[in-house]
Image (cartoon, grey):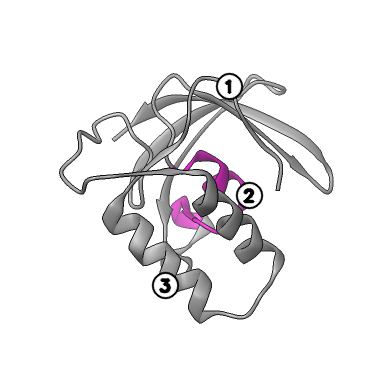
Amino acid sequence: MDNKIKDKEAVIISKDYRLLKKLVTANPHNESLERLRGKLQLVKPAPDDADTADLVTLNSFVKVLDLHTNRTMEFKLVMPHAANASQRKFSILTPIGTALLGHNKGDSVAWTLQGGHREVTVLEVA
């Protein structure tokens, strides 16, 4: 996993941290889970009552701008069992889901995939 955080350290609310920690410890190892494990080691946990208005959390609706294609994309970040691409529900285990978790509106986030490099800016979080 290679997530470069341009603006600031990622923050994750404690309830999401606990839920995701259970997910990665209860499942066998694979690339997606390893990426999420790595992310959980880097994030700063915040109290459950922290202001999350502009924070990408589980169940957030997110609008991002792809800095390479100049296209916007909107989706909801969900747990793997709720993922559905046709409904624009992306799993936290997708590369973009893991990369964006814990970032705020205005943050630019980059990551590397087997097929190359991606970078987006978070435009909206609801």
| Closer mark to the observer between disc 2 and disc 3 | 3
Mark 3, other Cα within 10 Å: few <14 / some 14–19 / many ≥20: few
Q: Residue furthest right?
A: 115
User: Residue flagged by tag 3: what amino acid is it?
Assistant: Lys
Residue to which mark 3 is pinned: 22
Task: Tell whether position 87 is magenta.
Answer: yes
In the image, 121 versus 41, the foreground residue is 41
Is tag 2's residue or tag 1's residue first in the polypeptide sequence?
1
Give me the C-alpha separation between circle 2 and circle 3: 19 Å
Residue 52 image offset from top left, x and y in percent: 25, 36
Does the image show residue 21?
yes
In the image, 6 versus 83, the foreground residue is 6
Residue to which mark 1 is pinned: 6
Residue shown at 65% from the left, 62% from the top: 34
Q: Quadrant of residue 57?
A: top left
Residue shown at 24% from the left, 31% from the top: 53
Residue 25 image offset from top left, x and y in percent: 51, 75
